[in-house]
Image: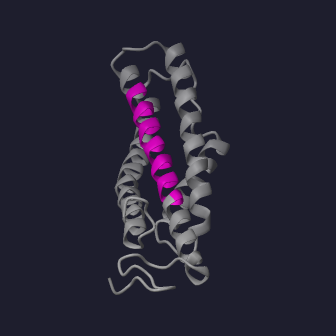
Amino acid sequence: RFWIKVGAQHPRRPSFGRGHRGPMIFTIFATIDSLTLLFAITGLVGSSGCLLKNIADLEHDLVNSVDFMRNMTTWALVEYVFLFINVAALLPFLGSWWMAVPQLMWAAIKIMRSLSGGGKMDEREIYKSKVYLKHRRFHMTGFLFYLCSWFIYFVRAMCAIMDIHVHGISPYD
């Protein structure tokens, strides 16, 4: 064993002394952020899917208007919570990751739509196909955007996890 000397290092283990602590911390925080983004986009896909299911239930007369309005309010709130988590996790990457700009633009569109009253529904008119189809189209757009983003976020998270193993800072290496 040629590496057993005073101050020598195992040939397969990188040295994380004073000079190498920065990349290790960066890798750990990048992994935490990637997993946070994956958590947020999974919640967005789920809440958007529940909003669409609720609209489909209304369209096929499986839910009454009171339950529909309550479910739409609940799932829209859940979507906004996950949207906030997504935006908070994306802000550090605004100038350095291509996916941050479309995500933040979509969040701005959602917020502007909410503030302008575009997401409001009148309980007396929700059974009109013109009304619920308008909402369904918007939520379908969001669902497709979230689903495409989910695959990108999943790959990013898996690459971040593998990065831990490549740099040898995993306890399982």
| Residue 8 visible here | yes
Q: Residue at x 46, y 12 (%)?
A: 64
Q: Can you tell which quarter of the image residue 77 is in?
A: top right
Left or right: where does residue 81 sit relative to residue 97? right
Secondary structure, magenta segment, majority class: helix
Q: Nearer the viewer, residue 138 or 90?
A: 90
- Residue 45 image position (x, y, % from top left): 42, 42
Q: Nearer the viewer, residue 87 or 165?
A: 165
Image colouring? one colour
Q: Residue at x 53, y 59 (%)?
A: 33
In magenta stretch: residue 36: yes
113 shown above or below 9: above
- Quarter of the image where the N terminus is located: bottom left
Q: Can you tell which quarter of the image residue 52 is in?
A: top left
Left or right: where does residue 80 sit relative to residue 158? right
Read off the magenta span.
32-54
